[in-house]
Image (spheres, rainbow, N blue to C red):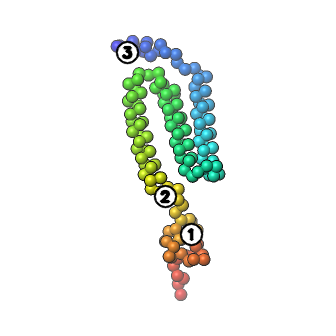
Amino acid sequence: MSSEANEMAHSQHAHPTNRFYLTIGAILIGLTVLEVIGYYGETQHWYAAGTAVFIILFLSALKFVSVVAYYMHLKYDNKLFTAVFVFPALLAVLVIGGMILLFGPLHGTSTAIHGTASSNEGVHGSGTAPSQQPGAPTTPPAH
């Protein structure tokens, strides 16, 4: 097929209008607002710790697919381009998901707070921090 025939075949489908792009943009803004609400909901203890991660990842994936399909015109292109795009995207999802599991739920301490700025106990261990004053220096005063 010549390049002119390809161009004619490509121009036969209806191109989206400006209204369509504005609608997709409004949907993306709405998804972003839901992501912020998902994060805020976890900080306000509306649901279990760690739930915001799944909410944000799911909504981000939805936004990603929307941008790729409509703004990058992948929905209207040859299916070969879709296949070439989807394989690395799935590979990235597997790698990122594996890292989240490795350093999150499988590790067991993904959301634990390890010490604070005012406590030396988190840095030096419970044996070195004074029992009544966790913010006190751990070294004895010079005489």
- Quadrant assignment for the N terminus: top left
Q: Residue at x 63, y 52 (%)?
A: 45
Residue at the spot of label 1:
119
Q: Amino acid at mark 3?
A: Ser
Residue at the spot of label 3:
3
Tag 1 secondary structure: loop
Q: Nearer the viewer, residue 106 or 120?
A: 106
Q: Amino acid at mark 1?
A: Ser
- Badge number at residue 141: none
In the image, residue 39 above or below residue 16: below
Rounded to the nearest angstrom, the CA distance separating label 2 from label 3 is: 57 Å
Residue at the spot of label 2:
109
Residue 74 placement (x, y as % from top left): 46, 26
Contact (Cβ within 8 Å) of mark 3 with mark 1: no
Rounded to the nearest angstrom, the CA distance separating label 3 from label 1 is: 69 Å
Viewer-side label of 3, 1: 1
> Is residue 99 among the parts visible in the rendering?
yes
Q: Residue at x 43, y 12 (%)?
A: 8
Rounded to the nearest angstrom, the CA distance separating label 1 from label 2 is: 19 Å
- Mark 2 neighbour class, 10 Å CA radius: few under 14, some 14 to 19, many 20 or more: few
